Structure formats: C-alpha cells, structure tokens
Image (cartoon, rainbow, N blue to C red):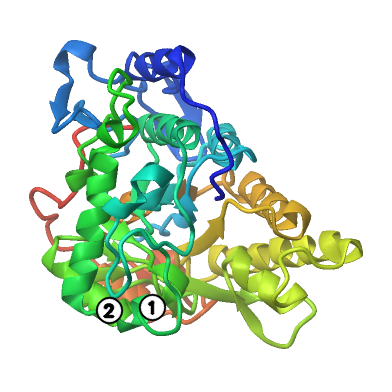
Amino acid sequence: MAATHRIAAGAAVTAVCAAALAGCGTGTGASREGAHGPHEATPAPAPRSAVGLIDDGSTAYTGAQPRLPRPERLKPGRKPPQFVVFSWDGAGEDSQRLFSHFRKVARDNDATMTYFLSGVYLLPEEKRELYRPPQHSPGRSDIGFNDTRGIADTVEQLRLAWLEGNEIGTHFNGHFCGGTGGVGDWSAAEWKDEIAQAKRFVKSWKTNTGMTTAAPLPFDYDKELIGARTPCLEGRENFLKAARELGFRYDSSGVNDQVWPQKKQGLWDLSMQLVPFPGHSFEQLTMDYNFMVNQSGATTQGDPSQHDRWGDEMRDGLLQGFYRAYRGNRAPLIIGNHFESWNGGTYMRAVEEVVEHVCTKEDVRCVSFRQLVDWLDAQDPATLRKLRTLKVGEAPKGGWASFLSAAPAPAPRGVPGAPAVTR
C-alpha cells in the first residue's frame, strides 16, 4: 500500500467517522438466513454515550464487536464446517481503494476477513522519527510512511471493517526482510518492542496527525490484537516467544500442508498452506506474492499478455485446494494477500472470484482468524486430535458420522475469546 494522497482530511471525513460509530456499515439489522445458517439480528454499535475513549481518543471501548458469532462445539457425528480465511498483509487504503472494495466483496458474500495493519500506515511522514525500528536508525521503514489523507482513509476503513465483524491484526511496522537487521535477526525482546510501537501508532494517530476531532477507532487495540503474520514469513521463532508472553492467540507466519491446525509454542499455528499450482509440477503457497514470483519473477508488472493466465492459475489453484479440503478432511483453508495491483491486478481478480465461488456454499464459513481460533478453542481436544489424523484431502473412510461419533468431553466454561453476541 503506497501512501499516495497529499491533501489533508476535512470535515467530510470527520462526519463519516462520526456516522460510523452511530451505526454505518453494520447492516440492516433484520434477521436473515445465510450460508452459515440462521442469523440473529445484527446488533448496533454501542451508543455514543457508552463510548469510553482510550488515551488521546484515537481508540475507544464501544462494547462487544458486532456480527461476531458465538463459537459452538461440534456435535458427535457431525461433519466439521469448511472454514476459509482470507487475510491481508499490510492492510491500508490508498488511491486504489482495494481495502474498501474487498470490504464490499466480503459483505456481498457473507464473509468476514482479517486485516493485518502495518502500524506505520497510521504514522505521517513528517513524524517518521517517532518510529525506532530494532537494529535500524530512527525513521527508517522499507515500506515508507503515510500522509494525513491516507491515514484518514485507512482509519475509516479500519473502523467500518471492525463494525462489520472483521478482525484487525498486525503486520508490524517497517517490513524489514532479509539482510542485516532484518526481522529474521530480531530477538524476542526486539519483537516485543516492535509490537509495542505498532500498538502505539494505532493508539495515537489523532495526536500524530492533528485530527483531534475525528471519531475514534471503535476498539481497544490491546484487546483486539491477538495475532499476526511476520514480514516475508521471517523471524517466526523469536516472534512466537514474544507473542506467547504478550497473550497472542495465533500466528500465520509459516507454511503448512492442508491439515487441521495445532498449537505451536502456545499459539494456534494458522500457517498459509500449499495448494496445487495448475500447469506446474509443484504446489504453491496460498499467497498472491508467491504466485507472482513463480510467474513473472522479480518484476511486479510482467508480460501483459500473460496476466489473465496468471490470475486464472492462482484462482484455479486456490479452488483446487478448497475442494480438496471441502470434499476431504475439511481442514481450514488459509489464504494470504496484499492490496496490490501486481501484474495488472490479476491476483485481486483471482481472489475476488474465489470469494464469490466458495463463501456462500453449504457448510462453508469464510471467517477471520479470530473467529477460527474461537471455534478451535471451543472444541473437544480429542475431536481436534482425531481431525489431525486425516491427511491432505483425506475424507474419513467410514464417513463423518462414524469418525466423530464418540461423545465429546464437557465443553469448557468460559471459552477464551468467546463473545456474548450471537450472529
């Protein structure tokens, strides 16, 4: 996400921000039947009188997140839902308007997603010295910073996304990959410092931009932030040590096969996965960047005559991976993306077509990572252990009814992260 805007936020943005807290973007509230089954009426955000501002008012506590489903324990003999997670690295809104576009795509297809925010996207260029990256000089960032308009637009999207039931995670700050001082060299203490700075930029965007009258983000980021994906999937071992001590619940910084997840160092390992790569003899990671590198190499804008084919390869690879799980072991499908127009935007088109194809199917739940870990934490551990015995694409030989027929242990009281609001 490039910081392309160069004009200050005005009264119109402030009005939109205030309207968001009054209920914009949260649906009609009418009961409806959807791909996930019966839905309760969508709860409205807390009234403005109930908003509790945090620190300088950049964030606020506004009550339980709307449209967040209560996780339910899988009943004996029932087939697991097919979970699909669409997640976005370095989420921010720029002149391409991809953040707002995919919010609409999600709404239109009964989906929620996870947006991994880069903290420096809420830090203006003129305040860059406030960022002190581990092993680098102050004010250094490999993805730049933002301007006032870009910050206002990004904050608006974050606000509306959260009110729609989406999750706001973190992609940290400066995105230092490879080489000396890259995230792969950071200690657990340095990761903690990087995370603290990412939180601080979210919690102080009003002070840093001067937009003191704008509406706050409607969540407490210390409580909202429960997971991440590291830049370039590097530095995971020490990040996990830091994340565990900070109370994170999951990580999506690895590479895995399409099997049921388990915990690693106390966090759910929700790594992206390997799926078929049409036209190739090897499998591919479920991320737009990896498809691009294996198609056009180092350039982000390769041969235009190949753009459609390359996008189709990504779409078809993701769909093959989806059906392999949907008809097989029902392992959650984890997909990662960037708000970029690489190779003419062909990967954005591919992702959109996958969302439209899979998210309204029977037994499919397109969810955020938060919703997935809530569900995993609500399950009988014995059930999850049994699910993990299924290999990639392997359906139970005797069918789901017999495979999961044993009576589960009693559900734990107070499932971690389980909200009080039903969907």
Is residue 230 visible in the rendered image? The answer is yes
Q: Say whether residue 43 is left or right of residue 143.
A: left
Circle 2: residue type: Trp
Residue at 25% x, 63% y is 194
Q: Which residue is mark 1?
A: 182
Q: Say whether residue 190 is left or right of residue 389.
A: left
| Residue 288 in picture, x, y percent from top left | 62, 64
Circle 1: residue type: Gly
Q: Which mark is residue 186?
A: 2
Mark 1 nearby-residue class (10 Å; few <14, some 14–19, many ≥20) = some
| Residue 251 in picture, x, y percent from top left | 32, 67
Residue at 33% x, 25% y is 211
Residue at 57% x, 46% y is 359
Cα gap from disc 2 to disc 1, whole angstroms: 7 Å
Q: Quadrant of residue 292?
A: bottom right
Secondary structure at numbered mark 1? loop
| Residue 157 in picture, x, y percent from top left | 46, 33
